[in-house]
Image (tube, coloured by chain):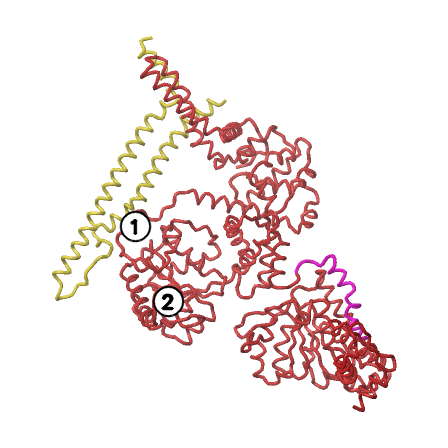
Amino acid sequence: MFPVLLLSWWYGRGWFWVADSVNQKLVAINEAFSVGILLKTLFAPWKQIQSPTSFRNFLQSSIDNFISRFIGATVRIGMLIGALFSFTVVIVGGFVAIILWPIIPLLVVILPIISLQAGGL
Amino acid sequence: MKTETTLRINSPRALKSRYAKSLRSKNSKYVFYIVLILSVFGGGYLAAFAGSSLWGFALIPGVLAFVIYLWDEGELKSLHENIDNRAIDGQLSPLILANLKTDSPSAYEIWQAVADTNDRWFFQNRYMLHHSIFEEFLNKQAGSAESIWSIAFELQKKYQTVGLTPSVLIVALLKSIKDVEKMLRRAKLELSEIEQGIEWLNDIEAKRRLAKEKQHFGGWARDWAYGYTPLLRYLGHNISEEVQYHGFFVDTALHSQVVDQMIKAMGSGTSSMTLVGDIGSGKTTSVYAFAERLLKDRSVPKAVKHSQVVSLDAPTLLSQTRSIGELEGLVMRLLNEARRAKNIILFFDDAQVFFGQGTGGVDLSNVIQPALEAGSVRLIFALTPKEWQNVGSKNPAIASRLQPMQVTPAGEQETIHVLRDQVLFIEYQKKVLYTQQALKEAYRLGSRYVDNQVMPGAALSVLEAAAPVAKDGYITAEVVQQSIESSIGVKIQQSKGDESQKLLTLEDDLHKYVINQKQAVSVIANALRRSRSGVGNPDRPVGTFLFLGPTGVGKTELSKALARVYFGSEKAMVRVDMNQFVDPQDVSRLITPMLGEQLGLLGQVRKQPFSVVLLDEIEKAHPSVINLLLQTLDEGVMRDVDNKPVSFKDAIIIATSNAGADEIRKLISGGEDPSKLQTHLVDTIIERQIFAPEFVNRFDEVVVFRSLTQDELVQVIDLIIAGINKTLDKQKVQVELTAEAKRWLVDKGYDAKLGARPMRRVVQKYVENILAKRILEQTADSGSVIKLDVPDFEQQEEV
């Protein structure tokens, strides 16, 4: 019964399990990189570093605040690129895993055949 | 869907359970890794270096190990969550399913299947449920498990467990045993409590899962849009970070209502609030729960989402400054930093100190008030109701800006829930284990003896204090009792051995100090026996007595004797002269625990609850004082000036009075039987309005002390002489009086109105003076017995 139970899971709920694992990794990346927060605060000043604005120092404070927002946006965009890269790796890796999933148990048969063929037997 | 009541031990789920069990064995994980590594390296070697075409075969074990590993991870490990509602084997925990060997097991075989699970050890350790109960009393006949399955399904439904867990089956097995309740009662347990063990295990499992789960707190970029807080980081304690990095595993159900209110208020624009609750009610815990919700709960309003709660304490701030001006400046900088950062909520624990109350208090109202009025920084204060009242009366402007949130003390069930969570941490730190009975006892004793905290804090303090006295690592109800007994000096455990013997012969011991007054001695001895055998009402004082009688008949002496004989020393007597409480304003003096440097009545009882409280000359007290005593006599509680209860439930309260003394003398000289005087005398003192009927009726007994006869006064002389001899023991000198000498002393000192009171003076004048001279003249050598007779006294009188 062992192989029957194993294979029935592998080609049944196992496939969904792989897909779910990929999904969980995507959620974890989304959380770790704070993607939602980054998008919402993309142009917010970096760490609230701002000059108080008044009529007399309007120009100076505007420049300071622009720099703060610029730094903030740069760092956040850098982080978003990192998140995008991680998403890509997981999506591609997950896609490959889902495609290869049904083949893995068959390797028990496939690998000896390949090795024998490669050896010219 | 209808549940089948059949068990198939060869169903796919049962087989998977058995495979899972094999894969969970001790070394299986290493076998997997070794096979995988050997296979990959072996295949690689054959292909690359040996030029063999058999590398594919070498990789087969590795592929198989990998596939089985994934199956285990993907399905077998979560088998307990995959429940099939249609059959028993679909619902049974895989741990048990793997252990069952037949389709129709006996009750005993089910026990064997659960016996090696963690849940079995949980019940054995937490409830002291010995396995012999199951071994001896469970049915061993095949197929006898029918009833157990149905009980188990009921329990599963009741406690919402995922399938038939080992805990559910253990309780079901226990419930199936005949007369189990009687057996449990012997261990001071009830079935309902054992059932709650299922809930307790569910909670532990949930916490275990929570600790393992990956938590989402907002990610790396969460705080990039908020300001730097270097000073707060240096001087404050970031509760949110503590929750994030170390976890928060306290059962927050108790304070969920307060936390909801806090989130709602702060989310809707209220900038500051005060948590008002007694010490131990869980104000700080509520703030931790609040901090956790702000980080984890996606449904909290945007205004507070991901906000950081930073706690500030007075000692840290004070240590950084040299003057109040510097301190104000520092707090101002901290408030400004919090305001600029935009994601900080400041928490002032023990906030009374910041409003100039209590030890080391500094008044920072000048700094806090403008911040509150501007509403630019969010603040949470924690205060007791009295401290909040003080803030309200001294700084109404501040109080009006703070939204009060009441943190109420927990009830028994809520406290037990909190304790179950908290003991896990104490157990880990102190390497001990608390039983369910210990938790219950901590609640009972905490509410009775810990008067500076409310629940659940009070019970938690009791449990923490009990840890050092654990027996073999276990903290049982008895250990908790012992711990309280040694720290407070009360007697909680049922009397046994020497103490029981002492209680049974208490009258004899008391009569060594008090002549006659059999009724008084008897009622006191009976009250103590009732209390210490557990028969008496534990929610009232041990005994309340009104002693009526003339001066010098032994009323006070009996109280002293009781303190000496049973409570260990005369110091265990708290004596209050009620003639000092004759005005209405004296009430406040009576309920003030500290009178200057000295302890007042309540201070003494709080320090020494197991005592004799003697209210001397009660008839002289003002009616307001008497009214105050009514509740104490009834419920064993008196509230101090701060409205904190002081328990008199372990005390014997004795009130003495001379009221009706003339009446007693008149009636006794008229030949009336003293034992029949009580009703008549009570009527008389009520008629004469000396005491109100409701006051007299509050006492367990009204005891009439009759005047002592001359023969009895001779016995009093004997007692006084015995006392002198005890004092002379050190000098190895003893004194003896002839019968005539004793009679002479009685004649000399007899006063019908003053009873035995003049006797001590007479003995001092005649006996002690003669002794002193002889010792100084060295006519009484060490080891000698000085015999005194009438001529000695007459000679002394001439002098």
**Chain under disc 1:** B
The chain drawn in red is B
Q: CA distance from mark 1 to mark 2?
A: 32 Å
**Residue B74: image x %, image y %?**
42, 32
Give the side of residue B356 with respect to residue B138, left or right. Answer: left
Subunit under mark 2: B
Q: Is B440 situated above or below B154?
A: below
Which region shows up in magenta? B492-519
> Which one is nearer the viewer's eye here, B483 or B635?
B483
User: With A116 as the anchor, is B27 left or right in this view?
Assistant: right
Q: Amino acid at mark 2?
A: Leu
Say which of B327 and B67 sits in front.
B327
Q: Is B8 within the magenta?
A: no
Q: Is residue B129 visible?
A: yes
Label 1 amino acid? Arg
**Residue B318, numbered label:** 2
Q: Is residue B349 left or right of residue B763?
A: left
Image quadrant assignment for residue B376: bottom left
